Amino acid sequence: MKLRIENLCFSYAGGGGVQDLSLQVETGEFVGLIGPNGSGKSTALKNLYRALTPDSGRVELDGEDLLRLSPRAAAQRMAVVCQENQLPFDFTVEEIVAMGRSPHKRLLDVDTPEDRRIVRAALEAVNLASLARRSFLHLSGGEKQRVLLARAIAQQCDFLVLDEPTNHLDIGYQLQIFDWIRRLKVSVLAAVHDLNLAALYCDRLYVLQAGRLVASGTPGQVLTPELIRSVYGVESRVELDPRTGRPAIRFLPEGMAN
Amino acid sequence: MKPGLRQRLSRPSLGLVVCLLSALAVLTLVLATGLGPVSVSPMATLNILLSRLPGFGALLTPSWDALEENIVLGLRLPRVCLGMVVGASLAVCGVAMQALVRNSLADPFVLGVSNGAAAFATLGMLFGAFSFLGTYSLSISAFLGAAVTIVFVYSLSRVRGRLNITQLLLTGVAISMVMEGVTSIIKLSAPNALGLHNAEFWMSGSLAGAKWAYLTLPLVVLLVCLAVLMLNHRGLNLLLLGDESAGALGVPVRRLQTLLVLISSLMAGVTIAVSGCIGFVGLMVPHFTRLLVGGDHKKVLPVAALLGGILVVWVDVVARLLIAPEELPVGVLAAVIGGPTFIWLLRKNGRARD
């Protein structure tokens, strides 16, 4: 067992949040968190990487109480790619990726050749070695997201938390990024917006609605027309794609279904 | 995206930049010490300076007169050294504040911290309000003023946990005005005229009264703060990514932010206590430093310190030459140069967000 969340509760002052969330990620598993906007996907993840502090509940990573670890110790075990990618000042791509090494650094440590090797390998893993000395600010959205993934790779954790990592990217980049993440062979918990992507890449899915868990299981078990109707309010047809073995969802908008 | 901007960044190495700037700083020291209403030739200045270095004194035959020696060692050198320390402190203070608010528009002067420090310091100077603190009462009162202002401005600008930059700048302006008003009230009710004249000149920012004794505290504070910031350079870089990303990468965000508030107020307060308000140095210097070496704080901090020192010394040289034998307060000149830079940065900042 990699990650175990038990009865996690968090409420925002203005209402909303997640109630009584329990889920597990096994070692090496790619687990997706799906649900409509505002259903609490990001909130749940933020409680993991401690941008928010849970009201109650327990989070265990490798058997350790995650919330009691120091920020540095937590960052040595868990890498996060979140939606923040704004930077006020100019850094090179290489410098951004090297930031992933900082949880492994003590106050007086300097960057070693080993760090530089890890950074280079991380850049190569996402095909960005040629951009190492470019300015981060002038990259395209897809390239920026790849840089942030490289930073998470350089962090060398075997658990990855992704908060809608491919939002606003075109389909080519989306597939590419998910492919790379799968290839890392680490345990992943990801909030995913696109149901077809979730179906393609996730081993198991948890479905959130209004802050509560309403379903869980393999994509084939979870992604049914009934569930999609009750959670998203959308009619759909789900077929098993014979080539991928995964469910493929076709949506039927109200005005066009007959 | 402009294709031209995607080109590989070729940045000079840190060692090279620091070496060049150090050489420039030494050159500045010699040249600026000689320049003023009574000018002393660079060779004479160099000889006088070298004669004081251990080991060199015996090698040189004195070829200068006592007046020149007095001007150089008694008046100019402490002033130039103080200028270096003040400039370096203001620049580093600007870097720290910009990391705190994640924006290049932060500066002790712009955010009202300088005026806050000045208000408290005036209170101490004219009424002896903090005299129980002893020799360093002026510095400590300025530090308190700076700390109060920075905490106030910072907490007022956080909207739903996020720092709003428009709110920050406007709050800074408002607090700055309030503090200036408070200073005026203090001055108007001042018991003695001499103190008032001193406070007036000091308020507009000046290095004219520099003495060797003024140098110790700012120098110690500069070195300690610079060292602490350098040790935390990774944390400072990560803070720029935003609170959430920084936290996820292992930075104790709150603790580091508190440290930055403390360091910024300490540097601003102590600097302002010896030189008054010299605005915009903390704004201009970090910006040009980043153009030179990029955003990495490991490089920005030492380079900004050197550049800041050199800049303030030269602005001070111009200030004492421009209307010689009268003197312009260096703060006035810094504002005349810094104001337009601020406006330029403001426009650039606006464009970047579109």
Image: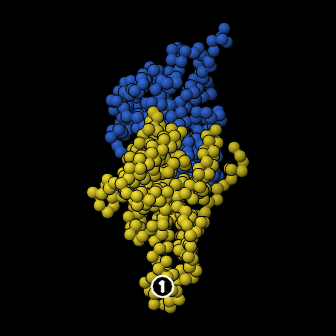
Q: Which amino acid does label 1 sit on?
A: Ala
Screen quadrant of the C terminus of chain A: top right
- Element on which disc 1 rests: helix
Left or right of residue B133: residue B182: right
Percent of width and height locating residue A15: 42, 23
- Host chain of mark 1: B
**Residue in the image at 46% along x and 71% along y:** B78
Q: Please provide percent x and percent y for residue A95.
A: 55, 53
Relative vertical location of residue A98 with respect to residue B302 in this rendering, above or below: above
User: In this rendering, does residue A249 appear at all?
Assistant: yes
Residue at 58% x, 80% y is B41
Q: Which residue lies furthest to the right in this view?
A: B3
Locate residue A230, reporting x and y percent: 51, 14
Q: From the viewer's perspective, is B333 left or right of B127?
A: right
Q: Which chain is blue?
A: A
In the rendered image, residue A112, in percent from the top left (x then y), is placed at 48, 60
What residue sits 62% from the left and 42% below the top? B350
* Chain letter for the yellow colouring in the rendering: B
In the depicted view, which residue is nearer to us: A189 or A95?
A95
Residue A156 appears in view: no
> Label 1: how many residues lie within 10 Å, few (<14), some (14-19) or many (20+)?
few
For disc 1, the marked residue is: B66
Look at the image and name its color scheme.
by chain
The image quadrant where one finds the N terminus of chain A is: top left
Q: Is residue A211 above or below residue B187?
A: above
Determine the residue positioned at 62% across, 51% down: B340
**Which of the 4 quarters of the picture holds residue B310?**
bottom right
Near-viewer residue (B132 or B93)? B132
In this rendering, position of residue B69 left or right of residue B341 = left
How many marks on residues? Answer: 1
Look at the picture and state if B117 lies above or below A257: below
